[in-house]
């Protein structure tokens, strides 16, 4: 009998504990849903929606151009009866910034914040217009444990010009192949765009736009000056005008190309790798012309300890040399051979070739 009573009492206690737990969870959930927090120092609850206010109309930015930078001032009002300290103001998009990010606002007073949106950093869309929605989140330090719902900036982003190629790569070309052939690429413009101006930021290239009616526009690049050997980068800047004649924010198309010496070694570097001390490494190197010019190697200068060069053969298309490297030093080592080429016109050109190896201790086995 006692055992039965004990089991009944135990079951009742367990049910009571479950109901208490459910009540506590529901109370906590409801307090979160109602957005109420109690400051640690006591006093009245602080509601999420009743701390700071910003005029709603200032959060609707309307329509802006894709590469436009919009900046405006918004008043931030403390609608409570106590001082509000903002520790930071963050954004959900890297296209938006707010200054200042930290501020203190006395009860009932207003402070100004400056909001900047760089539309060129927004998410790109293939359509002519797309929606913009950015959350601005104030981080409240005082009143303690208070929270503020994020403000949402809304608007439309409109495209002016869309290039089919985000970067126009003109490729690699021989130094003697200049000027390069005219390069063409296409792009589309918004229906709100009228005429367009185009310039480059280097004197060596000229850009022109050809309008083909309702279809894509054509951009033509013509080289006007010889470039030195090396990697080159410049920009084509297209400035559209609206149908009413107003200048719209410009769009930039990056252009890259590489100019090479016409005489090229194969391989471009003599890399001997890791070799033990006392070893001899060899590499065969041939030279050819990118434009198939006739030439001959009339000399070479070697700089590097243990490095030597021997001519193996020559034919109408290439000249072949044997590089030998005596492994005399530990660690990373580098040398250079400078070859002198002469073409049929008697013009001489120097072509450097880097040779390297990693010297390691010889095995005792």
Image (tube, rainbow, N blue to C red):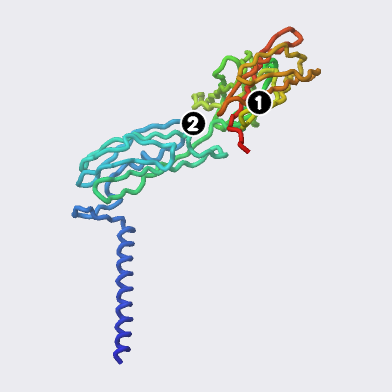
In the image, 111: left or right of 189? left
Q: Is residue 251 above or below residue 206?
A: below
Seen at 30% across and 88% down, the residue is 5
Give neighbour class at mark 2: few <14, some 14-19, many 20+ (Cα, 10 Å).
many
As drawn, the residue found furthest toward the front would be: 364
For this orientation, the residue located farthest to the top is: 346
Q: Which residue is mark 2?
A: 67
Nearer the observer, 352 or 58: 352
The reply to whether callout 1 and callout 2 are in contact (CB within 8 Å) is no
Q: Which residue is mark 1?
A: 270
User: What residue is rendered at 24% in x and 44% in y?
Assistant: 84
Picture coordinates of residue 34 (x, y %)?
31, 58
Q: Quadrant of residue 191?
A: top right
Report the quarter where the C terminus lies.
top right
Q: Residues within 10 Å of mark 1 (few under 14, many from 20)?
A: many
- The quarter holding residue 174 reads top right
Judged from the image, the secondary structure of the residue bearing numbered disc 1 is strand
| Relative depth, front residue between 31 and 250 | 31
Q: Which residue is painted at 31% across and 35% down in the image?
A: 100
In-front residue for pair 356/12? 356
């Amino acid at each position: 009998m006692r055992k039965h009573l004990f089991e009944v009492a135990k079951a009742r206690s367990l049910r009571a504990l479950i109901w208490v737990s459910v009540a506590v969870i529901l109370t906590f959930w409801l307090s979160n849903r109602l957005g109420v927090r109690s400051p640690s120092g006591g006093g009245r609850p602080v509601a999420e929606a009743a701390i700071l206010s910003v005029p709603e109309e200032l959060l609707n930015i309307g329509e802006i151009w894709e590469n436009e930078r919009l900046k405006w001032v918004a008043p931030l009002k403390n609608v409570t009866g106590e001082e509000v300290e903002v520790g930071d103001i963050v954004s959900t998009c890297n296209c938006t910034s707010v200054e200042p990010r930290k501020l203190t606002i006395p009860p009932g007073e207003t402070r100004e914040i400056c909001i900047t949106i760089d539309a060129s950093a927004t998410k790109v869309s293939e359509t002519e217009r797309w929606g913009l929605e950015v959350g601005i989140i104030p981080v409240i330090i005082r009143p303690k444990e208070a929270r503020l719902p994020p403000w949402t900036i809304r608007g439309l982003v409109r495209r002016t010009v869309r290039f089919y190629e985000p970067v126009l790569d003109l490729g690699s070309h021989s130094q003697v192949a200049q000027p390069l052939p005219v390069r063409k690429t296409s792009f589309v413009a918004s229906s709100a765009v009228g005429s367009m101006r185009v310039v480059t930021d280097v004197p060596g290239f000229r850009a022109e736009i050809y309008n083909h009616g309702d279809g894509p526009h054509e951009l033509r690049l013509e080289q006007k000056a010889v470039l030195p050997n090396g990697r080159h980068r410049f920009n084509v800047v297209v400035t559209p005008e609206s149908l009413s004649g107003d200048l719209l924010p410009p769009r930039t198309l990056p252009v890259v190309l590489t100019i090479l010496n016409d005489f090229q070694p194969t391989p471009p570097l003599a890399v001997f790798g890791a070799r033990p001390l006392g070893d001899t490494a060899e590499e065969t190197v041939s030279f050819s012309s990118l434009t198939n010019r006739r030439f001959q190697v009339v000399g070479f200068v070697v700089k590097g300890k243990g490095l030597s060069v021997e001519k193996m053969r020559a034919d109408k298309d290439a000249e072949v040399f044997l590089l030998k490297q005596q492994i005399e030093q530990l660690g990373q080592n580098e040398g250079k051979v400078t070859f002198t080429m002469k073409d049929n016109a008697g013009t001489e050109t120097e072509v450097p070739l880097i040779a390297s190896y990693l010297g390691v201790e010889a095995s005792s086995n």
